[in-house]
Image (cartoon, rainbow, N blue to C red):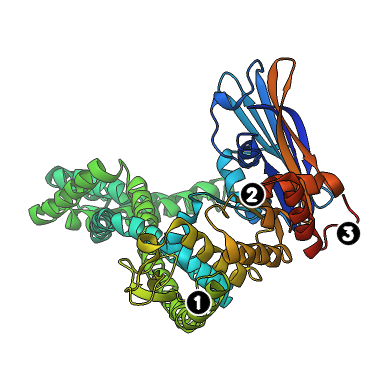
Amino acid sequence: MLRSLTIRNVALIDDLTVEFGPGLNVLTGETGAGKSIILEALMLALGKRAAADYIRTGAEKAVIEAVFAVQEVPQCLAESGIELEEGHLFFRRELYRQGKSLCRVNGHAVPLSLCREAAEELVEFLIQGEEQALLTPAKQLAVLDAYAGLGRLAGEVERLYRRWHAAREKAAAAAGAARARAREADTLRYQIAEIDRAAFRPGEIEELLREREWLLNAVRLTELGARARAFLTGEDHAAVESVGEAAAILAEIAKYREEMGYYAQALREAVALIVEAARELERLTDRAEHDPRRLDLVEERLELFRRLSRKYGETVEAILRFRAEAAAALETLVREEETTAGLEAEAERWLSEWQAAAARLQEGREEAARRLERAVEEELARLAMERTSFRITFAPVAQVPNPRGLQEVEFLFSPNPGEPLKPLSRIASGGEAIRTLFALKVLTAAADKVGTLFLDEVDTGISGRALEAVASRLNLLAARRQVLCITHQAVVAARGAVHYVITKEIAAGRAVVRVAPVSGAARVAEIARLVGGSPETAAEHARVLLESDGQVTPETT
């Protein structure tokens, strides 16, 4: 609830602090005394946009502070790291003449939008003309849900919608890139296949280059090989035989000169080496014959390498490295495709859960609507609207899914027998709309979590038995929450647990607004002023009103 409101340099207020209590707090005063300034100041403290003309003439800065006693921090503030200070929230708004504005909550600077969002969980304002808010489909749904105790399920429907929407947005973003990913994947698959078909191995190009050189010089190399073999084993030169004979001679000499045995052994080994060289030359000359077909194959292989090297790397190792990187990129793209499919499946899952929750919510709303219709008609009868008809209709929403559910509602109203039911927004007068709003507030008070209700002259245009009923219902509302009520009605003012009088005085040649609590004789006098008429009769009426509500004793004067 609202504990206190401090106002400095706002309009006609120089420095003012008002302490509020639980239950019904009434504020009264002459027309033009500045009652609306109190309301405006509280709204400014809670984030209402402001212009420089709110600042008191001659001042450069205005400050409004509102202190609330609460059980827990509103969720939006908790998400910003703001904690309670000994069970309280301190809102401070600073307005500067040059147009700058600052809002703080428990010392933390916050944007005005966050202040307004938090205020929705702390204060509900009902002022002249604001009853139109009841005429919107969203507000009417909220009223029905509050009456039916469906707030948690309605919140679940909204939460599931948000999750579905987020999943759908992600899936749509992923799908939007799917075509580009598919093109990239096709390119990578082609590149990998091209490299795999070539099947180059490390060192192969060097081998092919050597083979190519050999094939290009095959005729000359064959001739050289044949000549070398002839020198080693041919009939004319028979190097192997000459060396062999020399080895035998040296072996004989070694019998007498031992040191020659080394050379005899060396020559025998030379014979074996000459024989092996001759055989290798024979194999070489047999293989080195000119083979145009093999040369063409080698050239084709080298040309393939040159084509791939221009695209993928200058060496076989670079080409194979490109292939490994392409395979890794392709794997990532495949995973992204799987992720896209998973996001689409997730969106479908959230949609299915939303549909199930929305169906349960709709069923609960339709059942509660019948009960609320009867309850509103009974409550309006207590407010001197005995013959009013009230109905709730449902219509499919244009877009499904959505945060609110499967169908919208509309409140239909007929204040007089024989008149057709029409939308409340089209048929209800101001007084009728206010009383209907009161009826709904009374019926949903138990489920309403907002701690403070601020009413600004909403009893205007109501009189007689209906006014007595409104005052009674205000007491009922105040039993469950704090109610602040600006009023000109003596019947309502007499019901207040706390009564403040707002006056406008002239101090140092300037108008100043003052707010003071009244009790006892001062309160009797203020109620008498609201009653009007002769002072004696009005005072007597005021005492009767206060005594009937237990506010004063018969001896109070």
- State how far apart marks 3 and 2 are (Cα): 23 Å
Mark sitting earlier along the chain (3/2)? 2
Q: Position of residue 552 (x, y in %)?
A: 85, 57
Asked if residue 408 lies left or right of residue 266, the reply is left
Mark sitting earlier along the chain (1/3)? 1
Q: Position of residue 417 (x, y in %)?
A: 38, 76
To which residue does mark 2 refer? 487
Any part of residue 83 in sight: no
> What amino acid is found at the position of numbered circle 2 in the picture?
Thr
As drawn, the residue found furthest toward the left would be 292
Q: Position of residue 90 (x, y in %)?
A: 75, 42
Q: Is residue 165 above or below residue 323?
A: below
- State how far apart marks 1 and 2 are (Cα): 26 Å
> What amino acid is found at the position of numbered circle 3 in the picture?
Thr
Query: Mark 1 falls on what kind of element?
Result: helix
To which residue does mark 1 refer? 377
Q: Using the image, tell me which numbered label, if any, was put on residue 215.
A: none
Q: Using the image, tell me which numbered label, if any, was put on residue 553.
A: 3
- Residue at the image position 62 percent from the left and 49 percent from the top: 119
| 24 or 167, nearer to the observer | 24
User: Which of the two discs, 3 and 2, sits closer to the camera?
Assistant: 3
| 388 or 25, nearer to the observer | 388
